[in-house]
Image (cartoon, helix red, strand yellow):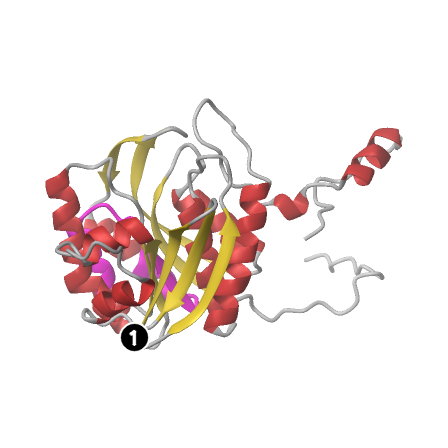
Amino acid sequence: MTASPIPDPEAGERDDSPAACVLVFNANDPSGAAGLTADLMAIASVGAHAMPIMTGAYVRDTSEVFDHFALDDEAVSEQARVILEDIPVQAIKVGFVGSPENLSAIAELASDYAEVPLLTYMPDLSWWREDQIDMYQDACSELLLPQTTVLVGNHSTLARWLLPEWSNEKAPTARDIARAANAFGVAYTLVTGIPLPDQFIENTLASPTAVLCTHKFERFEAVFSGAGETLSAAVTALIASETELTEAVSEALSYLDRCLDSGFRPGMGNVVPDRLFWAQPEDDEEEDAKESSFEISPNDTRH
């Protein structure tokens, strides 16, 4: 005989409507700074449900990436196909997946779900061999960008990749980069970290024909690991939750700014964004907790 659940008189009627679901392709990062860890925490923080597909594993610490081991493309494809047959997906995010073969497998999967928005994040790959970078980015241009709704990346990373023969003395604008991405089929490009005078940076969402929104922030006096992963995951989750694109970008950038402002250094390397800053008690709450004779449940957060 199955016991009946005990009702909670303070809970009211339970909301069984599903959260927006995001399929995420990325590598595991044992430092917790980037990769799938960043994706999962950022997506959950903005109220969506992440379905992580591991594509490989970094060998890294909080300072640098030493190596990467990619999973076989069949292992990546089977992980995704099984979950896609079970759970409806509202958005797809693709981070670093380690090999052209994995990009091909993901592109094939994405073509079967062409109506689902797909966000591609291109991280800094300067730790990799140059020939590997070229092969990976060429495969991404040919296979994944034609299906990409939003491309996200740092200004210098995207400019080197998409405008390798840029000869103008003036650096390419976000619209220049968006036009180059659109040549492969990308509708929108979010260019981050555009340097400005006086220690400011700019983040711009652009299409080939227009700048859709621009947000300026003061540069932090720290080097972060995982900032781009955090931002791109948050944007994807907000898109999955049916937030309009410019609003999703604005909210995700504000969220990232708070994550960086609350960042911490867990090891001897770079600062890691605190993606759960909202769960930390305020100063007065900390004092109350110290004075209280009762233990506070670890589930009592401010989310």
Vertical relation: 111 (above or below) 63: below
Q: Quadrant of residue 113?
A: bottom left
Query: Which residue is under mark 1?
Result: 114
Residue 80 placement (x, y as % from top left): 32, 58
Residue 240 visible to the viewer: no
Q: In which quarter of the image is residue 297?
A: top right
Residue depicted at 31% across the width and 36% down the height = 58
Relative side of 197 to 127, left or right: right
Looking at the picture, which amino acid does disc 1 mark?
Ala
Q: In which quarter of the image is residue 289?
A: top right
Number of callouts in the render?
1
Relative side of 61 to 162, left or right: right
Q: Is residue 27 magenta?
A: no
Residue 53 placement (x, y as % from top left): 35, 52
| Towards the viewer: 142 or 85 | 142
Q: Does the magenta stretch include residue 103?
A: yes
Which image quadrant: the N terminus? bottom right
Residues in magenta? 80-107
| Towards the viewer: 143 or 2 | 143
Residue 235 placement (x, y as % from top left): 46, 61
Relative side of 143 to 200, left or right: left
How many other residues sit within 10 Å of disc 1, few (<14), some (14-19) or many (≥20)? few
Residue depicted at 12% across the width and 56% down the height = 165
Residue depicted at 57% across the width and 60% down the height = 47
Vertical relation: 6 (above or below) 28: below
Residue depicted at 67% across the width and 45% down the height = 279
